[in-house]
């Protein structure tokens, strides 16, 4: 993930403009200094690489704050090809008349949707005047199964996903407490808390006997849709609302805008996770803000998905095309990021990983999906991008820390 973030940042400042990573403004007092220092490591590595290769950066990698947050605030995928600009306010989005009605229903939780931890609901505003003029939503995060079976359809990622072997110590924490052989499947959020007792004083609607199952039961009670029940040969993946919204927006045409609306009371950052941001930027819909927190078991869609409706064939083509563009961008960014890492101050215990990642990419270079699959595999280990970057890159010279750009 450090390679992917560095590749994205380096290509950004080489080609276009500065790039900024944001933290939650409410954590300013306790985290700003460390956040700024980690982003500075990215900047040092990216600018250093470009300078050594006689390329003039057209910006820096900067640290900042996500926009301040009120009820119903939005993250916007800014469709640059259609000339869209970052909106003036992410707290009071300017919407079409029909879009405003749907937005208010989502914001006020009048429609079934997921409202628990990290809840953002996808939504597409539609200004089209011909054809389909309806806005789309709510599109909450959905949990899917990604399996390694051979019966995958043409839109499935062809490169095999990584599933830790049963001998791996990673499974120890997934053994449900007080059982001999009952494990939480790979990819499940909080799956590595199966050895812990359910947290006392927290809601436990399914009367789970361990923390992993308590959280899953709570997510279900808070409205997350689970498509299929994972077995130990499956990998659970979560498709965020913004990603679902982008496929819909792209299919509907240029007068549409994909949004993610914050809902519930447990969502804190008004920014996109790194895996969402990679997808959004690859497709020309850069997000209004990017955070360096978690994108746990993030996956794109591999099949058309409309809650409560059967899929349409036009969506299959959209998914194939957009996923191909995303795969190509991942390949480019990861290759560049690994080159940057080669010339950067990588920590001693991560140098072997950099070499292994490059060797793996080289050995599978004919498979165009391999880089994107490595990213999916990486985020199946649940950790913030901040922590990963800080473990991979040594602290940089702190002489020129970058000040935030105010919103
Ligand atoms: Zn996301």
Image (cartoon, rainbow, N blue to C red):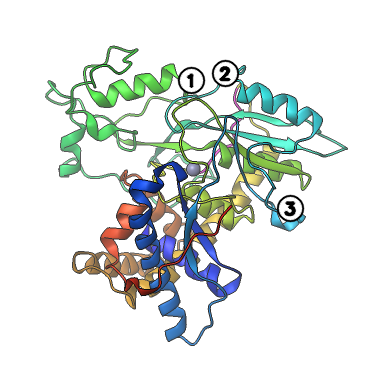
Q: Which mark is residue 223?
A: 1
Spot occupied by residue 265 in the image (x, y as percentages of width and height)? 47, 26
- First in sequence, mark 1 or 2: give its number: 2
From the viewer's perspective, tell me whether residue 170 is left or right of residue 85. Answer: left
**Whole-Å distance between the Cαs marked 2 and 3?**
30 Å
Contact (Cβ within 8 Å) of mark 1 with mark 3: no
Magenta residues (range): 300-307
**Image quadrant in which you'd find residue 382:** top left
Q: Element at badge 1?
A: loop
Spot occupied by residue 87 in the image (x, y as percentages of width and height)? 69, 48
**Whole-Å distance between the Cαs marked 1 and 3?**
32 Å
**Whole-Å distance between the Cαs marked 1 and 2?**
7 Å
From the viewer's perspective, tell me whether residue 358 is left or right of residue 180. Answer: right
Spot occupied by residue 62 in the image (x, y as percentages of width and height)? 48, 63
Q: Residue drawn 18% across and 30% down? A: 175
- Mark 3 — residue? 84
In this rendering, the label closer to the viewer, 2 or 3: 3
Q: Residue drawn 12% across and 20% down? A: 178
Looking at the image, can residue 384 be seen?
no
Label 3 packing within 10 angstroms: few (<14), some (14-19), many (20+): some
């Amino acid at each position: 993930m450090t390679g992917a973030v560095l590749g994205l940042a380096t290509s950004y400042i080489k080609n276009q403009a500065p790039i900024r990573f944001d933290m939650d403004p409410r954590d300013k007092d306790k985290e700003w200094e460390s956040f700024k220092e980690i982003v500075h490591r990215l900047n040092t590595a990216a600018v250093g690489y470009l300078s050594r290769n006689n390329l003039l950066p057209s910006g820096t990698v900067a640290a900042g704050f996500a926009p301040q947050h009120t009820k119903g605030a939005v993250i916007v995928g800014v469709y640059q090809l259609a000339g869209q600009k970052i909106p003036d306010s992410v707290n009071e989005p300017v919407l079409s008349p029909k879009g405003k009605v749907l937005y208010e229903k989502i914001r006020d939780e009048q429609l079934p949707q997921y409202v628990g931890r990290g809840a953002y609901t996808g939504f597409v505003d539609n200004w089209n005047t011909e054809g389909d003029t309806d806005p789309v939503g709510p599109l909450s995060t959905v949990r899917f199964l990604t399996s390694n079976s051979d019966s995958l359809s043409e839109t499935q990622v062809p490169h095999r996903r990584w599933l830790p072997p049963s001998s791996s110590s990673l499974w120890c924490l997934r053994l449900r407490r007080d059982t001999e052989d009952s494990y939480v499947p790979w990819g499940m959020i909080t799956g590595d808390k199966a050895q812990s007792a359910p947290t006392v004083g927290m809601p436990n609607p399914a009367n789970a006997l361990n923390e992993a199952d308590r959280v899953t039961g709570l997510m279900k009670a808070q409205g997350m849709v689970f498509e299929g029940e994972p077995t130990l040969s499956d990998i659970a993946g979560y498709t965020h609302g913004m990603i679902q919204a982008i496929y819909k927006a792209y299919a509907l045409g240029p007068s549409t805008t994909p949004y993610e609306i914050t809902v519930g009371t447990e969502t804190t950052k008004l920014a996109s996770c790194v895996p969402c941001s990679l997808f959004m930027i690859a497709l020309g819909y850069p997000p209004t803000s990017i955070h360096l927190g978690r994108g746990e078991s993030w996956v794109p869609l591999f099949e058309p998905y409309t809650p409560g409706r059967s899929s349409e064939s036009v969506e299959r083509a959209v998914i194939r095309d957009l996923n191909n563009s995303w795969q190509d961008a991942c390949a480019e960014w990861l290759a560049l990021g690994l080159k940057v890492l080669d010339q950067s101050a990588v920590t001693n215990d991560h140098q072997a990983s950099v070499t292994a990642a490059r060797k793996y990419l080289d050995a599978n270079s004919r498979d165009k999906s391999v880089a994107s699959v490595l990213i999916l595999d990486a985020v199946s280990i649940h950790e913030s991008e901040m922590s990963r970057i800080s473990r991979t890159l040594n602290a940089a010279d702190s002489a020129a820390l970058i000040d935030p750009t105010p919103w």
